[in-house]
């Protein structure tokens, strides 16, 4: 598998969901060709600066890139293929909402070979509370429509929603796992700052489950998925096979490299022996102007130090069933991990060590960020 990929951020949505803190803007129709052209130019500028290499994945995220016509997707894929060498089996993922199902066939024909469908719930009351515009039946039909293209399919669900209990979630998740998807991403609802949900929670109008209830819902999630043949390979992600795992996301979790192209996109790229963190301008017009003026859409680029690289590797890698190579972690940060912290975490059955690799136990996954902080101290 290639250790390099390309992320393309399409920032428009038909509406902004109340829990979303991504860089998104209301889609109001019109001509977006200037943004498409800027993204194509940005890809070429990255290749010119850092050199062409083989990309094993191309990920259309958002926002809702499912709004894109097949012809626009084809242009972006062609720009990436012209600037870089796309692997023969390059994974090309498109995030889409159930409402986008009528475009799935043309998007597949344009080159998309993996659909990630934002179903989010299979309960109509919950979907309304989450600000979604589709109902449960439409969500299921969209997964089936994506599968009918013959391409890989993943679906997203949000749990730990207000008022949700274990029995209801068990039934809902069980129903979702009967749909023709080989991968599921199951996220606990997080109240992010500066979102509509955060404002409601501050006024006492929203009360998600407490920590104990969230832990119970997480444990049920693991139980149901494992019984259905979709074990977790990352805290929130489950796949029926190794080949069904999200190749692009594995770049993040393994500490590899990716370009971040499009408004608000983040990237991690190598420049010689250095690792550069990039961030693009957030507002679409600012991004377009930056590309037209400078050739590249960056707002900032930062050279990461060894400790910063090591911390990212630890935080992200611990989330997976592969764990983290502690020798690599120590080499990057320039000092050894605290052996007393490792021994204590192992004794508490929160961490296990398989040779040089540290892996979270089932219990440890509930405390992933705290354990990473202990190891990095």
Image (cartoon, rainbow, N blue to C red):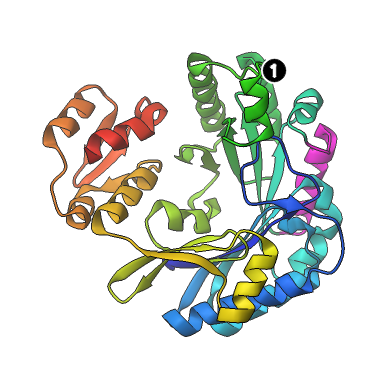
Q: Residue 179's image quarter?
A: top right
Q: Main secondary structure of the magenta part?
A: helix
Q: How many marks?
A: 1
Compare residues 296 and 178 and report the one nearer the observer: 296
The location of residue 206, given as percent across then percent down, is 67, 19
Q: Is residue 258 visible?
A: no
Using a 10 Å C-alpha cutoff, classify the residue at mark 1 as few (fewer than 14 neighbours), some (14 to 19) or many (20 or more): few
What's the residue at 77%, 30% (across, down)?
Answer: 127
The location of residue 76, given as percent across then percent down, is 67, 74
The image shows residue 127, relative to residue 111, as above or below, that is above
User: Is 253 colored magenta in this rendering?
Assistant: no
Question: Which quarter shows the N terminus?
Answer: bottom left
Question: Which quarter shows the C terminus?
Answer: top left
Circle 1: element type: loop
Q: Is residue 311 visible?
A: yes
What's the residue at 32%, 61% (across, down)?
Answer: 304
Q: Which residue is mark 1?
A: 205
What's the residue at 60%, 41% (across, down)?
Answer: 184
Residue bounds of the magenta highlight = 132-150
User: Is 136 colored magenta in this rendering?
Assistant: yes
């Amino acid at each position: 598998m290639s250790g390099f990929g390309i992320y393309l951020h399409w920032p428009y949505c038909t509406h902004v969901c109340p829990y979303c803190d991504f860089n998104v803007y209301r889609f109001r129709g019109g001509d977006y060709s200037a943004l498409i052209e800027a993204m194509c130019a940005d890809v070429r500028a990255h290749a010119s600066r850092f050199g062409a290499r083989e990309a094993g994945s191309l990920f259309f995220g958002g926002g809702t890139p499912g709004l894109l016509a097949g012809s626009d997707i084809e242009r972006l894929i062609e720009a990436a293929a012209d600037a870089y060498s796309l692997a023969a089996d390059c994974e090309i993922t498109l995030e889409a909402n159930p409402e986008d199902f009528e475009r799935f066939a043309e998007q597949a024909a344009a080159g998309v070979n993996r659909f990630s469908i934002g179903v989010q719930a299979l309960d109509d009351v919950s979907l309304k509370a989450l600000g979604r515009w589709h109902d449960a039946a439409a969500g299921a039909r969209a997964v089936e429509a994506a599968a009918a293209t013959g391409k890989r399919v993943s679906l997203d669900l949000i749990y730990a929603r207000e008022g949700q209990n274990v029995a209801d979630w068990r039934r809902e998740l069980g129903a979702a796992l009967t749909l023709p998807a080989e991968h599921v991403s199951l996220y606990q609802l997080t109240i992010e700052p500066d979102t509509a949900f955060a404002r409601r929670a501050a006024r006492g109008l929203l009360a998600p489950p407490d920590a104990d209830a969230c832990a119970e819902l997480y444990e049920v999630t693991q139980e149901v998925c494992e019984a259905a043949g979709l074990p977790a390979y990352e805290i929130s992600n489950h796949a029926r096979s190794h080949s069904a795992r999200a190749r692009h996301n594995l770049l993040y979790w393994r500490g590899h490299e990716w370009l971040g192209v499009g408004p608000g996109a983040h990237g991690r790229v190598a420049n010689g022996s250095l690792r550069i963190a990039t961030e693009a301008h957030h507002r679409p017009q600012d991004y377009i102007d930056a590309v037209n003026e400078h050739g590249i859409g960056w707002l900032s680029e930062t050279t990461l130090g060894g400790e910063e690289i090591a911390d990212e590797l630890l935080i992200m890698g611990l989330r997976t069933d592969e764990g983290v190579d502690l020798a690599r972690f120590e080499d990057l940060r320039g000092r050894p991990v605290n052996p007393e912290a490792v021994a204590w975490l192992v004794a508490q059955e929160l961490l296990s060590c398989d040779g040089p690799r540290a892996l979270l136990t089932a219990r440890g996954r509930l405390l992933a960020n705290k354990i990473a902080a202990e190891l990095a101290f």
